[in-house]
Image (cartoon, rainbow, N blue to C red):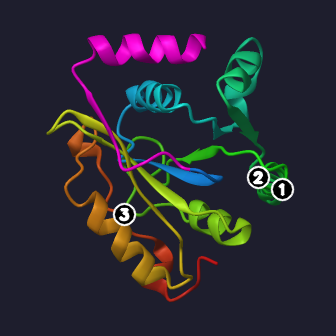
Amino acid sequence: MLKRLLARLFWLFSRWRLTADGVPTRPTILIGAPHTSNWDFVLMLAIAWRLGIEVHWLGKSSLFRGWRGPVMRRLGGISVDRSDPARVVGDVVAHVHEGRVFGLVITPDGTRGGNTHWKSGFYRIARETGMPVTLGFVDRTTMTTGLGPTLDLSGDVGADMDRIRAFYADKAGLRPERRTVPRLREETDGSSAT
């Protein structure tokens, strides 16, 4: 209740406009892109809280040390031990089997720019869990943010990424100069993201 109230106040006074193609009705991978600023996190929480979406997000284990740990977990954070990535998929599958509707927020373009490709973890998790992908966005040029379509991935990496690229083609992020074009290494080196 408090989260929804805070979100309403945020959107009431914000210069940003929230748009959504719909609210997911089943567990989904919620893409956060273009991820070009730390403010993206605030916008993501405001979107989720306003639309009543339970969100979880993956963060490096160092974010969960000390006093920050309880705060980050309360905000939906899941600590990722990069030496055991299979555990993360197992945890997500367990949540899916519990019947909970949630969005697992992943920022595939990495940490606010400087990358040439998106990381394929979102694709692998979606394919292994059977979860669809909901395209979340930030676009400073129109001062809009929100949720686009929810897509079921086919396993054809190139075709799936073409659909994702088409959606993000006109989305600039908060800092457009840090935007990474949605492209996976697997598309250019011939290997599979599944």
Considering only order in the chain, which callout, 3 or 1, is on the residue closer to the N terminus? 1
Q: Residue at x 52, y 18 (%)?
A: 4
Q: Residues within 10 Å of mark 3 (few under 14, many from 20)?
A: many
21 to 165, vertically: above or below: above
Q: Which mark is residue 97?
A: 1
110 to 169, vertically: above or below: above
| Residue to which mark 2 is pinned | 92
Residue type at numbered disc 2: Val
Residue type at numbered disc 1: His
Q: Residue at x 46, y 26 (%)?
A: 50
Residue 27 colored in magenta in the image:
no
Residue 5 colored in magenta in the image:
yes
Secondary structure at numbered mark 3: loop
Work out whether residue 183 or residue 126 is closer to the camera in this orientation and state it. 126
| Residue to which mark 3 is pinned | 182
Secondary structure at numbered mark 2: helix
Q: Which residues are magenta?
A: 1-24
Position of residue 88 in the picture relative to residue 57 (left or right)? right
In space, the residues marked 3 and 2 are separated at their CA atoms by 24 Å
Question: In the image, which is nearer the foreground, mark 1 or mark 2?
Answer: 1
